[in-house]
Image: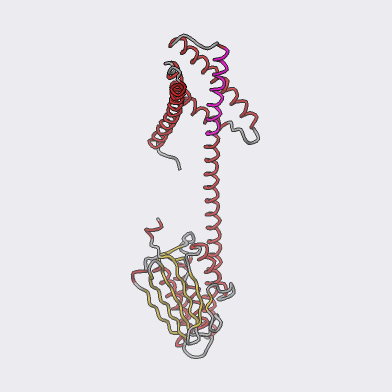
Amino acid sequence: MTMPFPAVAVSRWRAMALTGGVWTLVGCVAVAGGVGGALSTGRPLPSTFFFLSNILGMWLWALYTPLIFRLCERYPLDGPRWRRGVGVHVALFLVLWGLEFVVGWVLERFVEHPQRPLLQYFFGALAYCFFCYLGVLAVGHALRFHRLYLERTVRASELESQLLRSQLLALQMQLRPHFLFNALHTVSGLVRNDDKAGALRVVASLADLLRAVLRSDANQQVPLQQEVDLVERYLGIEQVRFQDRLRTDFHVDPEVLGALVPQLLLQPLVENAVRHGTCAREGEGRVSVHIRREAEMLCLSVRDSGAGDAPEGARQDRPSAESGGVGLANTRARLRHLYGARHRLLLSRTPDGGTLAEVAIPFLVQEAVQ
Protein backbone atom coordinates (compact mmCIF):
# COMPACT_ATOMS: atom_id res chain seq x y z
CA MET A 1 0.00 0.00 0.00
CA THR A 2 1.57 3.30 -1.11
CA MET A 3 1.22 6.51 0.86
CA PRO A 4 -0.62 9.45 -0.76
CA PHE A 5 1.50 12.34 -2.00
CA PRO A 6 0.82 14.70 0.97
CA ALA A 7 1.83 11.97 3.43
CA VAL A 8 5.04 11.34 1.49
CA ALA A 9 5.83 15.07 1.46
CA VAL A 10 5.24 15.40 5.21
CA SER A 11 7.41 12.34 5.86
CA ARG A 12 10.26 13.81 3.79
CA TRP A 13 10.05 17.18 5.55
CA ARG A 14 10.15 15.45 8.91
CA ALA A 15 13.19 13.42 7.87
CA MET A 16 14.96 16.56 6.66
CA ALA A 17 14.12 18.45 9.85
CA LEU A 18 15.30 15.54 11.99
CA THR A 19 18.57 15.26 10.05
CA GLY A 20 19.25 18.98 10.27
CA GLY A 21 18.41 19.04 13.97
CA VAL A 22 20.74 16.14 14.77
CA TRP A 23 23.69 17.66 12.91
CA THR A 24 23.03 21.08 14.46
CA LEU A 25 23.09 19.43 17.88
CA VAL A 26 26.39 17.75 17.05
CA GLY A 27 27.84 21.13 16.00
CA CYS A 28 26.63 22.80 19.21
CA VAL A 29 28.19 20.02 21.29
CA ALA A 30 31.50 20.53 19.46
CA VAL A 31 31.36 24.31 20.03
CA ALA A 32 30.45 23.85 23.69
CA GLY A 33 33.36 21.42 24.08
CA GLY A 34 35.78 23.95 22.58
CA VAL A 35 34.51 26.78 24.79
CA GLY A 36 34.55 24.59 27.89
CA GLY A 37 38.08 23.44 27.19
CA ALA A 38 39.26 27.03 26.74
CA LEU A 39 37.65 28.19 29.96
CA SER A 40 39.01 25.27 31.98
CA THR A 41 42.60 25.76 30.79
CA GLY A 42 42.64 29.54 30.72
CA ARG A 43 43.22 29.73 27.00
CA PRO A 44 41.57 32.36 24.81
CA LEU A 45 38.11 31.60 23.55
CA PRO A 46 37.91 29.92 20.11
CA SER A 47 37.94 32.20 17.12
CA THR A 48 35.01 33.10 14.89
CA PHE A 49 36.25 30.57 12.36
CA PHE A 50 35.88 27.83 14.95
CA PHE A 51 32.19 28.60 15.43
CA LEU A 52 31.45 28.99 11.72
CA SER A 53 33.39 25.91 10.66
CA ASN A 54 31.59 23.70 13.17
CA ILE A 55 28.05 24.93 12.53
CA LEU A 56 28.35 25.31 8.75
CA GLY A 57 30.28 22.04 8.52
CA MET A 58 27.49 20.21 10.34
CA TRP A 59 24.89 21.73 8.02
CA LEU A 60 26.89 20.54 5.02
CA TRP A 61 26.87 17.03 6.46
CA ALA A 62 23.12 17.33 6.92
CA LEU A 63 22.94 17.83 3.14
CA TYR A 64 25.28 14.89 2.51
CA THR A 65 23.37 12.50 4.77
CA PRO A 66 20.41 11.66 2.45
CA LEU A 67 22.85 10.88 -0.37
CA ILE A 68 24.90 8.55 1.84
CA PHE A 69 21.72 6.83 3.08
CA ARG A 70 20.61 6.25 -0.50
CA LEU A 71 23.97 4.73 -1.37
CA CYS A 72 23.71 2.48 1.70
CA GLU A 73 20.51 1.08 0.23
CA ARG A 74 21.82 0.74 -3.30
CA TYR A 75 25.43 -0.20 -2.59
CA PRO A 76 25.49 -1.89 0.85
CA LEU A 77 28.69 -3.18 2.42
CA ASP A 78 27.22 -6.66 2.87
CA GLY A 79 26.06 -9.29 0.44
CA PRO A 80 27.75 -10.71 -2.65
CA ARG A 81 28.58 -7.25 -4.11
CA TRP A 82 30.19 -5.72 -1.04
CA ARG A 83 33.39 -4.88 -2.96
CA ARG A 84 31.38 -2.67 -5.30
CA GLY A 85 29.83 -0.97 -2.30
CA VAL A 86 33.23 -0.34 -0.74
CA GLY A 87 34.44 1.26 -3.96
CA VAL A 88 31.42 3.55 -4.25
CA HIS A 89 31.64 4.71 -0.64
CA VAL A 90 35.39 5.28 -0.83
CA ALA A 91 34.90 7.39 -3.96
CA LEU A 92 32.15 9.45 -2.31
CA PHE A 93 34.28 9.88 0.80
CA LEU A 94 37.16 11.26 -1.24
CA VAL A 95 34.83 13.73 -2.97
CA LEU A 96 33.37 14.93 0.34
CA TRP A 97 36.86 15.15 1.86
CA GLY A 98 37.96 17.37 -1.00
CA LEU A 99 34.89 19.60 -0.60
CA GLU A 100 35.41 19.78 3.14
CA PHE A 101 39.05 20.78 2.69
CA VAL A 102 38.38 23.42 0.03
CA VAL A 103 35.37 25.01 1.76
CA GLY A 104 37.08 25.07 5.16
CA TRP A 105 40.37 26.40 3.86
CA VAL A 106 38.70 29.17 1.83
CA LEU A 107 36.42 30.09 4.74
CA GLU A 108 39.40 30.32 7.07
CA ARG A 109 41.27 32.68 4.73
CA PHE A 110 38.27 35.02 4.41
CA VAL A 111 37.27 35.04 8.08
CA GLU A 112 40.74 35.30 9.65
CA HIS A 113 44.36 34.87 8.78
CA PRO A 114 45.29 31.20 8.49
CA GLN A 115 47.08 29.95 11.57
CA ARG A 116 47.80 26.34 10.54
CA PRO A 117 50.03 24.99 7.80
CA LEU A 118 48.26 23.72 4.73
CA LEU A 119 49.39 20.10 5.27
CA GLN A 120 48.17 20.11 8.87
CA TYR A 121 44.81 21.47 7.79
CA PHE A 122 44.70 18.87 4.99
CA PHE A 123 45.06 15.92 7.37
CA GLY A 124 42.80 17.53 9.96
CA ALA A 125 40.05 17.70 7.37
CA LEU A 126 40.76 14.03 6.55
CA ALA A 127 40.23 12.87 10.15
CA TYR A 128 37.13 15.06 10.58
CA CYS A 129 35.56 13.84 7.34
CA PHE A 130 36.45 10.21 8.05
CA PHE A 131 34.66 10.06 11.41
CA CYS A 132 31.61 11.96 10.10
CA TYR A 133 31.29 9.70 7.06
CA LEU A 134 31.81 6.58 9.17
CA GLY A 135 29.04 7.65 11.56
CA VAL A 136 26.57 8.37 8.76
CA LEU A 137 27.51 5.09 7.07
CA ALA A 138 26.82 3.14 10.27
CA VAL A 139 23.45 4.81 10.81
CA GLY A 140 22.49 4.26 7.15
CA HIS A 141 23.23 0.53 7.34
CA ALA A 142 21.42 0.28 10.69
CA LEU A 143 18.32 1.82 9.11
CA ARG A 144 18.65 -0.54 6.15
CA PHE A 145 18.87 -3.61 8.40
CA HIS A 146 15.84 -2.39 10.36
CA ARG A 147 13.86 -1.94 7.16
CA LEU A 148 14.82 -5.44 5.96
CA TYR A 149 13.83 -6.87 9.32
CA LEU A 150 10.40 -5.20 9.16
CA GLU A 151 9.88 -6.39 5.57
CA ARG A 152 10.79 -9.96 6.49
CA THR A 153 8.50 -9.83 9.52
CA VAL A 154 5.59 -8.60 7.39
CA ARG A 155 6.34 -11.18 4.71
CA ALA A 156 6.48 -13.97 7.30
CA SER A 157 3.18 -12.77 8.77
CA GLU A 158 1.57 -12.76 5.32
CA LEU A 159 2.84 -16.26 4.58
CA GLU A 160 1.57 -17.47 7.95
CA SER A 161 -1.85 -15.94 7.25
CA GLN A 162 -1.95 -17.57 3.81
CA LEU A 163 -1.00 -20.93 5.30
CA LEU A 164 -3.65 -20.60 8.01
CA ARG A 165 -6.28 -19.69 5.42
CA SER A 166 -5.32 -22.68 3.28
CA GLN A 167 -5.54 -25.00 6.29
CA LEU A 168 -8.96 -23.63 7.24
CA LEU A 169 -10.28 -24.01 3.70
CA ALA A 170 -8.96 -27.57 3.57
CA LEU A 171 -10.69 -28.43 6.84
CA GLN A 172 -13.92 -26.80 5.69
CA MET A 173 -13.90 -28.65 2.36
CA GLN A 174 -13.21 -31.89 4.26
CA LEU A 175 -16.28 -31.37 6.43
CA ARG A 176 -18.75 -30.64 3.65
CA PRO A 177 -18.53 -33.98 1.78
CA HIS A 178 -18.82 -35.73 5.15
CA PHE A 179 -21.99 -33.80 5.94
CA LEU A 180 -23.50 -34.35 2.49
CA PHE A 181 -22.78 -38.07 2.65
CA ASN A 182 -24.76 -38.37 5.89
CA ALA A 183 -27.67 -36.38 4.44
CA LEU A 184 -27.78 -38.58 1.34
CA HIS A 185 -27.64 -41.64 3.60
CA THR A 186 -30.85 -40.39 5.23
CA VAL A 187 -32.53 -40.13 1.81
CA SER A 188 -31.45 -43.65 0.86
CA GLY A 189 -32.86 -44.99 4.13
CA LEU A 190 -36.24 -43.48 3.42
CA VAL A 191 -36.23 -44.88 -0.10
CA ARG A 192 -35.43 -48.37 1.21
CA ASN A 193 -38.36 -48.07 3.62
CA ASP A 194 -40.61 -47.09 0.70
CA ASP A 195 -41.43 -43.74 2.32
CA LYS A 196 -41.84 -41.77 -0.91
CA ALA A 197 -43.49 -38.73 0.65
CA GLY A 198 -40.77 -38.49 3.27
CA ALA A 199 -38.06 -38.95 0.65
CA LEU A 200 -39.52 -36.10 -1.42
CA ARG A 201 -39.61 -33.79 1.62
CA VAL A 202 -36.04 -34.71 2.50
CA VAL A 203 -34.83 -34.12 -1.06
CA ALA A 204 -36.45 -30.67 -1.03
CA SER A 205 -34.85 -29.88 2.33
CA LEU A 206 -31.55 -31.28 1.09
CA ALA A 207 -31.65 -28.88 -1.85
CA ASP A 208 -31.97 -26.00 0.59
CA LEU A 209 -29.08 -27.41 2.59
CA LEU A 210 -26.89 -27.71 -0.49
CA ARG A 211 -27.53 -24.07 -1.39
CA ALA A 212 -26.73 -22.96 2.16
CA VAL A 213 -23.59 -25.08 2.52
CA LEU A 214 -22.12 -24.25 -0.88
CA ARG A 215 -23.11 -20.60 -0.83
CA SER A 216 -19.83 -18.97 0.35
CA ASP A 217 -16.65 -21.02 0.28
CA ALA A 218 -14.41 -18.07 1.26
CA ASN A 219 -16.17 -17.13 4.51
CA GLN A 220 -14.73 -18.84 7.54
CA GLN A 221 -17.13 -17.09 9.93
CA VAL A 222 -20.82 -16.47 9.35
CA PRO A 223 -23.66 -15.01 11.46
CA LEU A 224 -25.09 -17.43 14.01
CA GLN A 225 -28.55 -17.01 12.45
CA GLN A 226 -27.25 -18.71 9.29
CA GLU A 227 -25.89 -21.65 11.28
CA VAL A 228 -29.13 -22.00 13.22
CA ASP A 229 -31.16 -22.08 9.99
CA LEU A 230 -28.83 -24.73 8.60
CA VAL A 231 -29.15 -26.93 11.68
CA GLU A 232 -32.93 -26.56 11.72
CA ARG A 233 -33.08 -27.78 8.11
CA TYR A 234 -30.83 -30.70 9.01
CA LEU A 235 -32.97 -31.61 12.00
CA GLY A 236 -36.03 -31.41 9.78
CA ILE A 237 -34.50 -34.09 7.57
CA GLU A 238 -33.64 -36.27 10.57
CA GLN A 239 -37.13 -35.76 12.00
CA VAL A 240 -38.62 -37.24 8.81
CA ARG A 241 -36.27 -40.18 9.09
CA PHE A 242 -36.75 -41.03 12.77
CA GLN A 243 -40.34 -39.82 13.25
CA ASP A 244 -41.31 -40.20 16.93
CA ARG A 245 -37.89 -41.55 17.90
CA LEU A 246 -36.39 -38.04 17.83
CA ARG A 247 -37.38 -34.95 19.81
CA THR A 248 -35.47 -31.69 19.43
CA ASP A 249 -35.29 -28.63 21.65
CA PHE A 250 -33.82 -25.26 20.54
CA HIS A 251 -33.08 -22.37 22.92
CA VAL A 252 -31.20 -19.44 21.34
CA ASP A 253 -30.99 -15.99 22.92
CA PRO A 254 -32.17 -13.49 20.29
CA GLU A 255 -29.35 -11.08 21.15
CA VAL A 256 -26.67 -13.53 19.97
CA LEU A 257 -28.09 -14.30 16.51
CA GLY A 258 -25.79 -11.68 14.95
CA ALA A 259 -22.63 -13.14 16.50
CA LEU A 260 -20.02 -14.63 14.19
CA VAL A 261 -19.30 -18.35 14.40
CA PRO A 262 -17.19 -20.69 12.25
CA GLN A 263 -19.14 -21.98 9.28
CA LEU A 264 -20.58 -25.47 9.91
CA LEU A 265 -19.82 -25.28 13.64
CA LEU A 266 -23.12 -26.56 14.99
CA GLN A 267 -23.95 -29.19 12.36
CA PRO A 268 -21.32 -31.84 13.31
CA LEU A 269 -22.18 -31.43 17.01
CA VAL A 270 -25.89 -31.88 16.31
CA GLU A 271 -25.18 -34.77 13.92
CA ASN A 272 -23.31 -36.66 16.64
CA ALA A 273 -26.07 -35.92 19.13
CA VAL A 274 -28.73 -37.25 16.73
CA ARG A 275 -26.74 -40.40 16.01
CA HIS A 276 -26.14 -41.27 19.67
CA GLY A 277 -29.48 -40.00 20.92
CA THR A 278 -31.49 -42.18 18.53
CA CYS A 279 -29.29 -45.23 18.07
CA ALA A 280 -27.73 -45.87 21.46
CA ARG A 281 -30.95 -46.86 23.17
CA GLU A 282 -34.48 -47.80 22.29
CA GLY A 283 -37.31 -45.34 22.74
CA GLU A 284 -37.37 -41.60 22.23
CA GLY A 285 -34.11 -39.78 21.62
CA ARG A 286 -33.68 -36.18 22.66
CA VAL A 287 -31.37 -33.50 21.25
CA SER A 288 -31.19 -30.12 22.97
CA VAL A 289 -29.35 -27.07 21.65
CA HIS A 290 -28.74 -24.04 23.90
CA ILE A 291 -26.89 -20.92 22.77
CA ARG A 292 -26.24 -17.94 25.02
CA ARG A 293 -23.72 -15.25 25.82
CA GLU A 294 -21.59 -15.30 28.97
CA ALA A 295 -19.56 -12.10 29.42
CA GLU A 296 -17.31 -11.88 26.34
CA MET A 297 -17.85 -15.49 25.27
CA LEU A 298 -20.48 -17.14 23.10
CA CYS A 299 -21.46 -20.48 24.61
CA LEU A 300 -23.06 -23.26 22.59
CA SER A 301 -24.13 -26.58 24.12
CA VAL A 302 -25.59 -29.66 22.44
CA ARG A 303 -26.99 -32.42 24.66
CA ASP A 304 -28.25 -35.87 23.68
CA SER A 305 -29.84 -38.72 25.59
CA GLY A 306 -27.70 -41.51 24.14
CA ALA A 307 -24.70 -43.39 25.45
CA GLY A 308 -22.32 -40.94 23.84
CA ASP A 309 -18.57 -40.94 23.40
CA ALA A 310 -17.35 -39.56 26.73
CA PRO A 311 -16.22 -42.21 29.23
CA GLU A 312 -18.24 -42.72 32.39
CA GLY A 313 -17.55 -40.00 34.94
CA ALA A 314 -14.89 -38.35 32.77
CA ARG A 315 -14.78 -34.82 31.50
CA GLN A 316 -12.55 -34.39 28.48
CA ASP A 317 -10.98 -30.97 28.06
CA ARG A 318 -9.18 -32.31 25.01
CA PRO A 319 -11.02 -35.30 23.59
CA SER A 320 -9.19 -37.58 21.23
CA ALA A 321 -9.34 -36.95 17.50
CA GLU A 322 -11.43 -40.08 17.06
CA SER A 323 -14.06 -38.86 19.54
CA GLY A 324 -17.07 -37.99 17.40
CA GLY A 325 -15.39 -39.02 14.15
CA VAL A 326 -14.50 -36.58 11.41
CA GLY A 327 -16.98 -33.94 12.54
CA LEU A 328 -15.64 -33.24 16.04
CA ALA A 329 -12.01 -33.72 15.08
CA ASN A 330 -12.47 -31.24 12.27
CA THR A 331 -14.32 -28.77 14.49
CA ARG A 332 -11.58 -28.97 17.10
CA ALA A 333 -8.88 -28.23 14.52
CA ARG A 334 -10.79 -25.28 13.06
CA LEU A 335 -11.38 -23.73 16.50
CA ARG A 336 -7.70 -24.08 17.31
CA HIS A 337 -6.73 -22.34 14.06
CA LEU A 338 -9.26 -19.52 14.41
CA TYR A 339 -9.04 -18.72 18.12
CA GLY A 340 -5.89 -20.33 19.48
CA ALA A 341 -6.22 -20.69 23.26
CA ARG A 342 -9.31 -18.44 23.35
CA HIS A 343 -11.80 -21.25 22.93
CA ARG A 344 -13.15 -24.28 24.73
CA LEU A 345 -14.58 -27.58 23.45
CA LEU A 346 -15.65 -30.01 26.18
CA LEU A 347 -17.36 -33.40 26.14
CA SER A 348 -18.93 -34.73 29.32
CA ARG A 349 -21.35 -37.43 30.43
CA THR A 350 -24.78 -36.24 31.60
CA PRO A 351 -26.61 -37.79 34.61
CA ASP A 352 -29.09 -39.57 32.31
CA GLY A 353 -26.29 -41.30 30.39
CA GLY A 354 -26.17 -38.94 27.44
CA THR A 355 -23.39 -36.67 26.23
CA LEU A 356 -23.02 -32.91 26.54
CA ALA A 357 -20.85 -31.06 24.00
CA GLU A 358 -19.95 -27.50 25.02
CA VAL A 359 -18.23 -24.90 22.86
CA ALA A 360 -17.16 -21.43 23.97
CA ILE A 361 -15.66 -18.91 21.54
CA PRO A 362 -15.10 -15.12 21.69
CA PHE A 363 -18.28 -13.13 21.13
CA LEU A 364 -17.69 -11.18 17.92
CA VAL A 365 -20.05 -9.30 15.62
CA GLN A 366 -19.52 -8.25 12.02
CA GLU A 367 -18.56 -4.64 12.84
CA ALA A 368 -15.81 -5.81 15.22
CA VAL A 369 -13.89 -7.71 12.56
CA GLN A 370 -14.13 -5.21 9.70
Rendered location of residue 161, percent (x, y): 52, 54
Who is closer to the viewer here, 368 or 242?
368
Q: Is residue 181 above or below residue 101?
A: below
**Position of the N terminus by quadrant:** top left
Residue 86 appears left or right of 29: right
**Residue drawn at (56%, 82%), measured in percent from left and top?**
311
Q: Position of residue 42 (x, y in %)?
A: 45, 20
Q: Residue at x 50, y 11 (%)?
A: 115
Q: Which quadrant: the C terminus?
A: bottom left
Q: Is residue 201 visible?
A: no
Question: What x and y, as percent, mark residue 344?
Answer: 48, 70
Q: Give residue 15's position: percent from left, percent from top.
A: 43, 33
**278 to 30, vertically: above or below:** below
Rendering quarter of residue 235: bottom left
In front here: 145 or 81? 145
- Residue at 48% x, 87% y is 352
Query: Would residue 120 be counted in the magenta stretch?
Result: yes
Front residue (pair 28, 56): 28
* Dominant SS type (magenta): helix
Magenta highlight on residue 362: no
Instruction: Please give the range of residues in magenta.
Output: 119-140
Looking at the rendered structure, the number of numbered marks drawn on it comes to 0
